């Protein structure tokens, strides 16, 4: 069990209690942030067991700075890896196009760059939230969001029973296919990006450096980085595909992966061959929503602004949301006003990051003359490559 997280609650907040729907990275970060603001917090989660889909994620300084404010950075660093550099390579030859070291950038932005297994981060956040008194109800499927006695309640199905959890505010942190977003009447469906992600983990090959490697090629790219204390290598292969997979996370067709990278550099093919199996799912994002909040209900993380993973900001933006929501509740004295203030602070920034992530998805997959121009620009940027996104990292 994690040690309690110290927090100093202000004597007045816009809400005294919250229900958070969803126990992913964003939902658990929200629970911690709201506890630190002095609220009583109940988390309801549809899954019967906390189990993050996927393998690894990258955490940039804008996220690790908040985790440090939670008092959790030392524990996170015990299970995460501090990568040495971002090594951008040609998929065809394996040659390095440019490299930027994370250490100097971390010093400039006042917090580290880390790579971590999703399950390790989720478990850390869940333990910390429970240590602070957050209640987490698993196996709770949301069936309704209703007004109740000046507040709001989430009606969930647990087995054959319907249970109502009432609070001053409700936060939908339930992902790209958010049930809370549907209840709000913000019915924009997620948009399939015509990309499939194949994920796998393998033992770290001998002499493999602790880098984040990005191999780029026509209509595909591969991201590789260590997790689990550096003993395991996380592979994420992105390929163009016109039809989404039938399930959200499905067993991946290894033959399809190897065919997509058949003419790539030998080192890429060897990494993929070392994977015993792949998991596969379609990549989606959401066009910017006109609003996140209605009355005492708001959205957070992928439910509000699902984005493509080409800036490593999905988890980071959910963590930022959590901190911003807690600040708004401490600043305002009315719950609905606080949720609108939170929305106003976050809408523009997340929309810009969504747009930039989409752009990166196109840039990574260039071929011909545009590829040559891209590589020339990257070489000129060199060590300053990470500063291109300083506007994200210094927030």
Image (tube, rainbow, N blue to C red):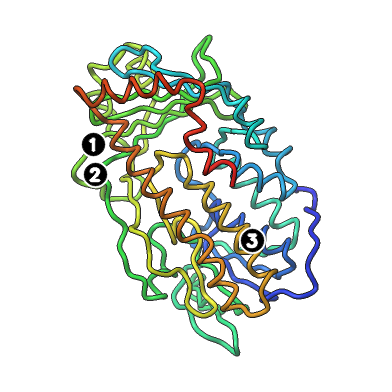
Question: Please, which residue is most extreme toward the bottom here?
Answer: 149
Count of residue discs: 3
Residue at 31%, 45% in the rendered image: 282
Q: Are there few (<14), some (14-19), or many (20+) residues within 10 Å of tag 3?
A: many
Residue 292: percent from left, percent from top:
45, 68
The mark nearer the N terminus, 3 or 2, is 3
Residue 36: percent from left, percent from top:
73, 61
The mark nearer the N terminus, 2 or 1, is 2
Q: State the residue in front, 149 or 133.
A: 149
- Rendering quarter of residue 221: top left
- Image height check: is 121 above or below 21? above
Q: Which residue is mark 1?
A: 240
Residue 180: percent from left, percent from top:
44, 70
In the drawing, does residue 248 fall left or right of residue 121?
left
The CA distance from mark 1 to mark 3 is 36 Å
The CA distance from mark 2 to mark 1 is 6 Å
Residue at 71%, 74% in the rendered image: 13
In the drawing, does residue 5 fall left or right of residue 232?
right
- Rendering quarter of residue 182: bottom left
In the picture, the disc for residue 333 is none
Q: Which residue is mark 3?
A: 31
The CA distance from mark 3 to mark 2 is 34 Å
Q: Are marks 3 and 2 in contact (CB under 8 Å)?
A: no
Q: Are marks 2 and 1 in contact (CB under 8 Å)?
A: yes
- Image height check: is 34 above or below 215? below
Q: Are there few (<14), some (14-19), or many (20+) residues within 10 Å of tag 2?
A: some
- Rendering quarter of residue 191: bottom left
Residue at 67%, 58% in the rendered image: 32
The mark nearer the N terminus, 1 or 3, is 3
Residue 109: percent from left, percent from top:
63, 36
Q: Which residue is mark 2?
A: 194
Q: Secondary structure at mark 1?
A: strand
């Amino acid at each position: 069990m994690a040690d309690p997280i110290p927090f100093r609650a202000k004597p007045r907040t816009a809400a005294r209690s919250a229900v958070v729907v969803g126990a992913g990275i964003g939902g658990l970060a929200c629970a911690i942030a709201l506890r630190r603001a002095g609220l009583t917090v109940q988390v309801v989660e549809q899954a019967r067991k906390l189990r993050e889909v996927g393998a690894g994620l990258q955490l940039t300084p804008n996220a690790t700075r908040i985790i440090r404010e939670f008092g959790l950075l030392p524990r996170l660093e015990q299970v995460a890896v501090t990568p040495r550099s971002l090594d951008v390579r040609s998929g065809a030859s394996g040659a390095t196009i440019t490299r930027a070291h994370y250490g100097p950038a971390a010093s400039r932005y006042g917090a580290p760059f880390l790579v971590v297994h999703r399950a390790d981060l989720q478990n850390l956040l869940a333990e910390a939230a429970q240590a602070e008194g957050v209640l987490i109800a698993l196996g709770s499927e949301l069936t309704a969001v209703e007004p109740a006695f000046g507040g709001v309640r989430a009606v969930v199905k647990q087995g054959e029973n319907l249970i109502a959890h009432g609070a001053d505010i409700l936060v939908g942190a339930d992902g790209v296919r958010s049930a809370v977003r549907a209840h709000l009447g913000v019915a924009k469906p997620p948009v399939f990006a015509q990309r499939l992600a194949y994920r796998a983990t393998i033992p770290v090959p001998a002499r493999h450096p602790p880098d984040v490697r990005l191999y780029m090629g026509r209509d595909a790219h591969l991201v590789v980085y260590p997790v689990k204390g550096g003993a395991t290598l996380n592979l994420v292969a992105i390929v163009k595909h016109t039809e989404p997979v039938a399930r959200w996370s499905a067993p991946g067709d290894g033959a399809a992966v190897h065919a997509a990278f058949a003419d790539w550099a030998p080192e890429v093919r060897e990494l993929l061959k070392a994977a015993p199996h792949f998991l596969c799912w379609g990549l989606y994002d959401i066009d910017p929503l006109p609003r996140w909040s209605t009355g005492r209900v708001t959205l957070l993380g992928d439910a509000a602004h699902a984005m493509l993973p080409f800036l490593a900001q999905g988890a980071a933006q959910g963590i930022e949301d959590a901190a911003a929501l807690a600040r708004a509740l401490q600043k305002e004295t009315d719950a609905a006003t606080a949720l609108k203030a939170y929305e106003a602070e976050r809408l523009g920034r997340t929309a810009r990051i969504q747009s930039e992530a989409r752009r990166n998805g196109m840039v990574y997959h260039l071929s011909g003359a545009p590829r040559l121009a891209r590589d020339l620009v990257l070489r000129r940027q060199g060590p300053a490559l990470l500063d291109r996104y300083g506007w994200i990292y210094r927030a």
